Amino acid sequence: MRFLDALHSSRPQEAERLLGRLGAFLPADGLLPVKGGTEDESLHPLDLAPYPHRPARSLFKAEVISADLDRLAALQQDDGGWIVDYLKISPAGSLDWRGHATVRAVDVLRRNAPTAPG
């Protein structure tokens, strides 16, 4: 979906057609179970359509995105970072990916923050 979001800039008709086809496979809550992942591991709506005002975002209802933003914000740890919630190969790998998860979470939350009027 993120590829099709990027493709939309140069080939909007093709991207919209393919996004529509992919959207038919999305459950209403936007959660896609990860086969072979940890128990209850899923891709969430913000994993698929992290940024507002992009074509992939139109595949999700506003309340689904709002709930996922709340979920992502609530995952912030006491030290200010986020943990990885996918299959961890090793404790070192988990720490290695934690920085990436934190930067990504902050980016997604900032880009989705409501803008102040005027």
Image (cartoon, rainbow, N blue to C red):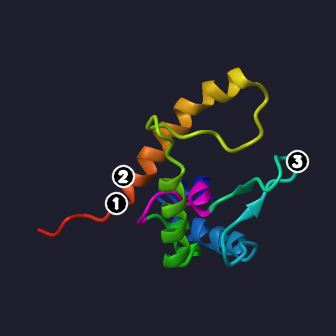
What residue is at 72 percent from the left and 75 percent from the top? 27
How far is disc 2 from disc 1 in space, using C-alphas?
5 Å
Look at mark 2 in the image and give the residue it sits on: 110
Quadrant of the image containing the N terminus: bottom right
Image location (x, y in percent) of residue 63: 51, 77
Image location (x, y in percent) of residue 87: 77, 39
Q: Residues within 10 Å of mark 2 (few under 14, many from 20)?
A: few
Q: Are marks 3 and 2 in contact (CB under 8 Å)?
A: no
Q: Report the side of 81 relative to 4 (left or right).
A: left
Instruction: Specify start and end residues of the magenta stretch as a single range.
Output: 45-53
Look at mark 3 in the image and give the residue it sits on: 36
Q: Is residue 40 magenta?
A: no
Look at mark 1 in the image and give the residue it sits on: 113
Image location (x, y in percent) of residue 37: 83, 47
As displayed, is residue 32 above or below residue 24?
above
Residue lying farthest front? 78
Q: Is residue 49 magenta?
A: yes
How far is disc 3 from disc 2 in space, using C-alphas?
31 Å
Quick one: 74 or 18, which is closer to the camera? 74
